[in-house]
Amino acid sequence: MELDIERKRTAAPEMDEAAEKRRKVESDFNLHHCPPSKVLHVRAVPDGSTQYDMMAAVQQFGPVSYVTLMPKVRQALIEMESMESAIAVVEHNKTNTVVVKGRPVFFNFSKSQNIKRFSEPGPSLEGQQPNHVLLFTIFNPLYPMTTDVIHKICSPHAVVVRIVIFHKNGVQAMVEFPTIEDAARVKDKLDGADIYAGCCTLKIEFSKSQTLNVRVNNEETWDINLVGQEMFQPPVPIGKPPLLERSGAEPLVLNPPGAMAAYGQPRPPQPVYASQADPNIMFSARQQPARYANPYGDYSAGGSAAFSNEPRVLMVYGLPPEINCHHLFNLFCQYGNVLKVKLLMNKQGTAMVEMDHPQAATSALRLLHNTPLPKGRMELGYSKHMSIMSNPNPPPLPDGSASYIDFTGSRNNRFLTEEGSSKNRVIAPTKVLHFYNGPSDMDENSITQAFVDRQVAPPIAVKVFTRGGDRGERSSTGLLEWREIEEAAHAMALVNHAELKSQGGQVFTVKLAFSPSPHAQ
């Protein structure tokens, strides 16, 4: 009897410990296996992370409605605008690492279906108390933010007293209004809106500051009492559309909350204007390569046009690890001129490609989507960005090449002249490639070796049309055939625009194109 009591006493702590472990496992399982929700629970958030960092980590999947940070427990909540976007984030994170400030973070669905806003009942949060001063946070600020811009978006809803713009945590501004009611009205009208279509998204909170100190009116500070001073008007950088081109026009294209399209879908072609007084506001187009006759219509590369909301930037997913910016250029240049390519360092296998014309982006999306590549399938969708932000010091990829390259004006773009454009045939990937501009003495063996040297599956059939050495031609051309489209697309990415030498030492830039021919015989 005493022995049984002793055994129970000894086993009790072990049983309690095992039960505690089971409870913890069950709790973690329930936390990480919640039903789908628009709210994402983010774990392992690095110290010092901002709301901008959180939004940047998921913005490629769709618009973000709200972000709440919990720095003490290194967690965050992100509310997406659509359930589809939230599901896309979680599914992507199952097979890909998402990095914030150089550290991996982990996404699961939250138990909550929405994040409590400051105006809703709930626990006390910083900035909950209504105030006549608002804090504006501008996410994805592709265009310059000045006091003139902030004043123009706020003034239709309330009198603006003072503005202070600062850059401590991204781009932020504090805006003072005469009354709390004025500030609340501006917050209700503009919170979650885009200043420009697809970028410069506003997150607006009540500030704890009671007044703003302004000494001079310029691009970053403004006071209504100093209106007699000349407002500073900064020069418009090349490639950025000015706010207004015609004087007297109404001030701004503004997409209200919810106007953004769902993940992977094109954006609405028509913007919503802050005022309908003049819906034909004209913007200067970004500068492009040399002037040419574009096959997609009347779009002069060196001229100007109405600022268009039609997407030109594509998101590319499912890329194999060896693909870099040059390889993507080699694929996309078949469908129009490529301006910029960016590999996302925090999204393995994901890239952005900016074309020079909306129709070129549409053609690439329609014909390249679901193209098979080694170790996966390339998937395309429209980006919510209207252009890719330039990066003078991009981080390197594992192969040592830059993760961002500007191809504007590249001689390898194929729609630079009317004559060149007429020769391009825009077709979907096939297992037969047409090659041209090869060395004049190139034969089947040297062609095959060019692919082997670059670790690409060699073609199973080769047909050379022009024997350069025999006919006195300067270059050779022909057809190459692979067993599968996957191999041909991989060859296009890695070998297109490769430099090959003739026996005499002359360098040729070999160009490849998808061919409609069924075979290379």
Image (cartoon, rainbow, N blue to C red):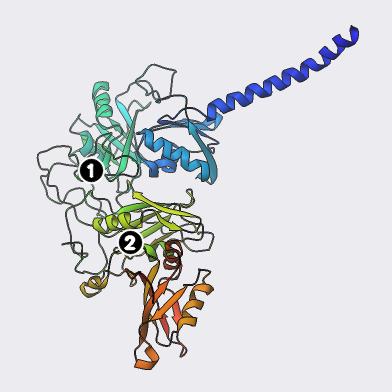
| Left-right relation of 371 to 22 | left
Task: Identify residue for label 2.
Answer: 428
In which quadrant will I find the C terminus? bottom left
Residue 510 in picture, x, y percent from top left: 40, 77
Residue at x 44%, y 75% (from the top left corner): 461
Asked if marks 2 and 1 touch (Cβ < 8 Å), the reply is no
Q: How many marks?
A: 2
Reply above or below: 476 against 299. Answer: below
State the residue in front, 226 or 2: 2
Q: Position of residue 361 (x, y in %)?
A: 29, 56
Q: Nearer the viewer, residue 215 or 352?
A: 352
The first of marks 2 and 1 along the sequence is 1
Q: Is residue 463 left or right of residue 241?
A: right
Label 2 sits on what residue type? Ala
Q: Which element type, helix, strand or loop, lies under badge 1?
A: loop
User: In the rendering, at what x and y percent does residue 336 appear?
Assistant: 29, 63
Which quadrant is the N terminus positioned in?
top right
Instruction: Count residues near mark 1 (Cα–Cα under 10 Å), then give few for <14, some for 14-19, many for 20+.
Output: some
Does residue 405 appear left or right of residue 423 in this picture?
right
Q: Which mark is in front, 2 or 1? A: 2
How many residues crowd around disc 2 within 10 Å: few (fewer than 14), some, or many (20 or more)? some
- Looking at this view, name the residue that lies furthest to the top: 1
Give the amino acid type for the residue marked by disc 1 in the picture. Pro
Residue on which disc 1 sits: 268
Q: Quadrant of residue 335?
A: bottom left
Is residue 170 at all visible to an observer of this figure?
no
Quick check: can you spot residue 518?
Answer: yes
